[in-house]
């Protein structure tokens, strides 16, 4: 594996200072965010315990950006994430989010080409409409019957072709199959 393909190792000392092992200097959360924006993977390890703290620090970076008014995550998405921790769908949500972001990354170059041409560059991203419909159907299906989610049964098609009972039945079947596979692991 080439040096640039390995994650950048950041060690957290007892003083909570973060140490870049490649450049032998201390870094801040903003420095780490800059590494990630530049395309670099990072791994943050507690020096004393050896625990991987990467997730904790990435969440802290997101929280700091959101608190500064750099709102990327709509309130509805944050609310849905919190709700997913209290339901039995929390094993599916990470896979769903990862697939959605992968689609976004794959279409990013096409979106950038259209950025100056179209009023809504996201709409020009290949598969964006399909992704939106799948996400809506997924959330409606997974949250059917969950208090506070606005429905006790499967979502109905409101005329825009987003969901149908048949689509929801298929999604439920696929999710049940995924859950069976996951439980076997």
Image (cartoon, helix red, strand yellow):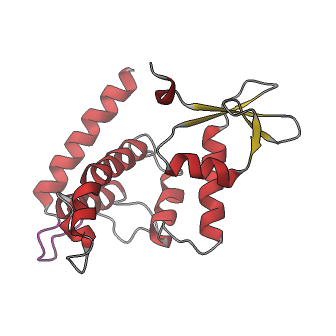
Farthest residue, direction front: 23
Residue at coordinates 41% horizontally, 46% vertically from top-left? 89
**Res. 128 image quadrant:** bottom left
Above or below, 37 relative to 3:
below
**Res. 12 image quadrant:** top right
Above or below, 35 relative to 123:
above
Above or below, 99 relative to 112:
above
Front position in the image: 6 or 63: 6
Residue 58 falls left or right of residue 4: right
**Number of callouts in the render?**
0
Residue at coordinates 17% horizontally, 57% vertically from top-left? 127
Quadrant in which the N terminus appears = top left
Residue 2 in sight in this render: yes
Q: Is residue 157 magenta?
A: yes
Determine the main secondary structure of the stretch shown in magenta: loop
Query: Residue 129 location, x and y as percent?
Result: 18, 64
Q: Is residue 114 magenta?
A: no
Query: Residue 73 location, x and y as percent?
Result: 48, 66
Above or below, 78 relative to 53:
below
Front position in the image: 130 or 137: 130
Residue 154 in sight in this render: no
Residue at coordinates 49% horizontally, 30% vertically from top-left? 4
Query: Residue 34 location, x and y as percent?
Result: 58, 52
**Res. 134 image quadrant:** bottom left
Front position in the image: 97 or 23: 23
Residue at coordinates 21% horizontally, 70% vertically from top-left? 123
Residue 135 falls left or right of residue 68: left
Quadrant in which the C terminus appears = top left
Q: What range is drawn magenta here? A: 155-162
Residue 138 falls left or right of residue 67: left
């Amino acid at each position: 594996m080439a040096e640039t393909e390995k994650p950048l190792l950041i060690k957290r000392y007892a003083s909570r200072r973060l140490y870049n092992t490649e450049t032998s200097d201390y870094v801040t959360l903003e420095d780490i965010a800059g590494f990630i924006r530049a395309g670099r993977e990072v791994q943050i390890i507690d020096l004393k315990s050896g625990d991987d703290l990467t997730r904790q620090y990435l969440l802290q970076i997101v929280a700091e950006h959101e608190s500064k008014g750099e709102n990327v995550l709509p309130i509805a998405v944050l609310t849905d994430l919190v709700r997913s921790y209290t339901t039995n769908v929390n094993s599916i949500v990470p896979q769903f989010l990862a697939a959605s972001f992968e689609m976004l990354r794959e279409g990013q170059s096409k979106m950038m080409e259209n950025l100056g041409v179209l009023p809504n560059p996201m709409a020009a991203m290949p598969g964006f409409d399909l992704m939106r419909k799948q996400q809506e159907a997924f959330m409606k299906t997974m949250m059917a019957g969950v208090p506070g989610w606005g429905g006790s049964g499967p979502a109905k098609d409101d005329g825009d072709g987003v969901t149908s009972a048949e689509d929801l039945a298929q999604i439920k079947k696929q999710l049940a199959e995924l859950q069976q596979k996951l439980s076997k692991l």
